[in-house]
Amino acid sequence: MYMSKKDEFKVFAKSHPELVRSVHSGDTSWQQLYEIYDIYGDDDRAWNNYLKKDNGSSNITHITDIVKNIDMDSVQKHINTAQKALGLVQELTGKSTPAVTGKGPVTPRPINHFFED
């Protein structure tokens, strides 16, 4: 049986009592909610402001969603780019960090000594 978009929205709204409370409290209107549903459907991200979840599980769910959406190839490319940039800066300045060379800390030369005075 074919359901119209309006009927689908009614089923969606009935399954989320938070929406009814939002309308009754005057925070939003059915028209606004229907427009969101018409554009985004039941996509969780579109309903974050209206649907309140259990705090304990929603925090874990939110973190899990963030981790799922991380593109590890992109992260690795950014890390490689940053490492290359640091290497270039070190090459240009002629300085290297102790972690890279394996040497201990280097004491800076006093400002008043020039050309091995």
Image (tube, helix red, strand yellow):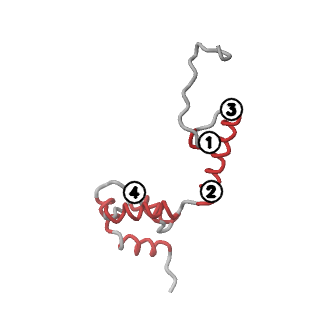
Residue 95 found in image quarter: top right
Query: Which residue is painted at 63% across and 37% down in the image?
Result: 96
Mark positioned earlier in the residue sequence (4 or 3): 4
Amino acid type assigned to the residue bearing label 3 in the image: Gly
Mark positioned earlier in the residue sequence (4 or 1): 4
Name the element at disc 3. Answer: loop
- Decide which of 7, 92 is in the foreground and name it: 92
Which residue is disc 2 drawn over? 74
Amino acid type assigned to the residue bearing label 2 in the image: Ser
Mark positioned earlier in the residue sequence (3 or 2): 2
Tell me if 10 is positioned left or right of 101 in this view. left
- Decide which of 47, 80 is in the foreground and name it: 80
What is the x, y in percent for residue 3?
A: 49, 80
Q: Residues within 10 Å of mark 2 (few under 14, many from 20)?
A: few
Query: Which residue is painted at 50% across and 68% down in the image?
Result: 41
Which residue is disc 1 drawn over? 101
| Image quadrant containing the C terminus | top right
Res. 94 mark? 3
Name the element at disc 4. Answer: loop
Name the front one of labels 3 and 2. Answer: 3
Mark positioned earlier in the residue sequence (4 or 2): 4
Q: Distance between the residues labelled 1 and 3?
A: 12 Å
Name the element at disc 2. Answer: helix
Res. 81 mark? none
Q: How crowded is mark 3: few (under 14 residues within 10 Å), some or many (20 or more)?
A: few
What is the x, y in percent for residue 28?
A: 37, 56
Name the front one of labels 1 and 2. Answer: 1
